[in-house]
Image (cartoon, rainbow, N blue to C red):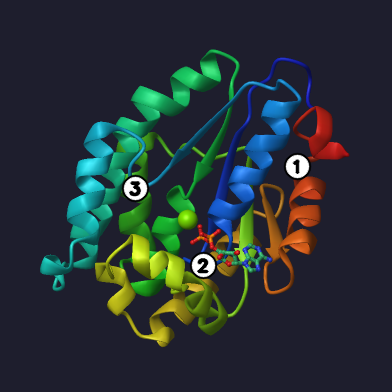
Amino acid sequence: MLASAGVARFITFEGLDGSGKSTHLERAAAWLEAARVPVLVTREPGGTELGAAIRGVFLDPRFAGMDGTVELLLVFAARRQHLLEVIEPALAAGRHVLCDRFTDSTWAYQGAGRGVAGQVIERVDQLATGGRQPDRTLLFDLPAAAARRRGHSPARRRNAAVDRLDAEAVTFYERVRQGFLDRAAGAPERFRILDSAGSIAATEAAVRAALADLLPGPAGA
Ligand SMILES: Nc1ncnc2c1ncn2[C@@H]1O[C@H](COP(=O)(O)OP(=O)(O)O)[C@@H](O)[C@H]1O
Ligand SMILES: [Mg+2]
């Protein structure tokens, strides 16, 4: 399906920490800005002042024993504010939205990772977002151990102290990875699974191909 001019798209970037979401989101935003395509870049949890405050609580190692359903409620609280304050207004104004993580991360981390039941996630999602789905979701996929090595690069260690989720074992991240793959299998028309184990250039070519039908200009180049 070709995008008609003027239709703003909601595109999410998903995957483990270290899978390349931020790297490729920045690159995609750069091609679009160079082509004067209006675009808004944002992220979860966060994206608003309230969301940033919730993100601080969410990642704080002091709350190591946080219950999975509490995590779920925190991320959906931030997500509702983010949708109302940032995402929907940008789309209504004709800007494409590129968002680093959205509800699929909740299914992967709180669902597959922490074991919160799918019915609970669905109910809270209905309440918080009305079941809002992106137009396209790029899943950056690679083995959990490899993502962890990248995510714990010296640069990242310098910039951010180890957060609450960094303390989880690799088996947790393997469940999360599988959770993302299961989400993708359940919505193949929305998802594109991109192999992120190889070079940045190879993954970037896959990103361009995965967005070519939705976005104008160099995304299709
Ligand atoms: N194919 C690839 N795609 C994206 N990043 C890659 C790739 N290969 C290696 N990297 C490196 O892996 C790290 C990915 O980090 P980042 O983009 O911040 O991931 P995330 O935002 O998903 O945590 C970066 O240091 C990047 O240079
Ligand atoms: Mg990132």
Work out which quarter of the rendered image holds the N terminus and state it.
top right
Q: Residue at x 74, y 68 (%)?
A: 199
| Mark linked to residue 33 | none
Which residue carries the number 3 mark? 45
Q: Cβ–Cβ below 8 Å for labels 2 and 1?
A: no
Where 140 falls versus 171 (above or below)? Answer: above
In this rendering, position of residue 18 left or right of residue 47: right
In this rendering, position of residue 59 left or right of residue 28: left
Which residue carries the number 1 mark? 211
Q: Position of residue 111 (x, y in %)?
A: 38, 66
Going by the numbered disc 2, the residue's amino acid type is Gly
Residue 150 or residue 142, whichever sits in front: 150
Which numbered disc, 2 or 3, marks the residue closer to the eye? 2
- Distance from disc 2 to disc 1, alpha carbons, whole Å, reads 21 Å
Q: Let me know if residue 190 appears in the view.
A: yes
Going by the numbered disc 1, the residue's amino acid type is Leu
Q: Cβ–Cβ below 8 Å for labels 2 and 3?
A: no
Residue 59 or residue 152, whichever sits in front: 152
Work out which quarter of the rendered image holds the C terminus and state it.
top right
Which numbered disc, 2 or 1, marks the residue closer to the eye? 2
Which residue carries the number 2 mark? 18
- Distance from disc 3 to disc 1, alpha carbons, whole Å, reads 24 Å
- Marks 2 and 1, the one that precedes in the sequence: 2
Q: Position of residue 119 (x, y in %)?
A: 35, 58
Dividing the picture into quadrants, the one containing residue 27 is top right
Number of other residues with Cα within 10 Å of mark 3, as a class: few under 14, some 14 to 19, many 20 or more: many
Whether disc 2's CB lies below 8 Å from ligand 1 is answered yes
Where 107 falls versus 189 (above or below)? Answer: below
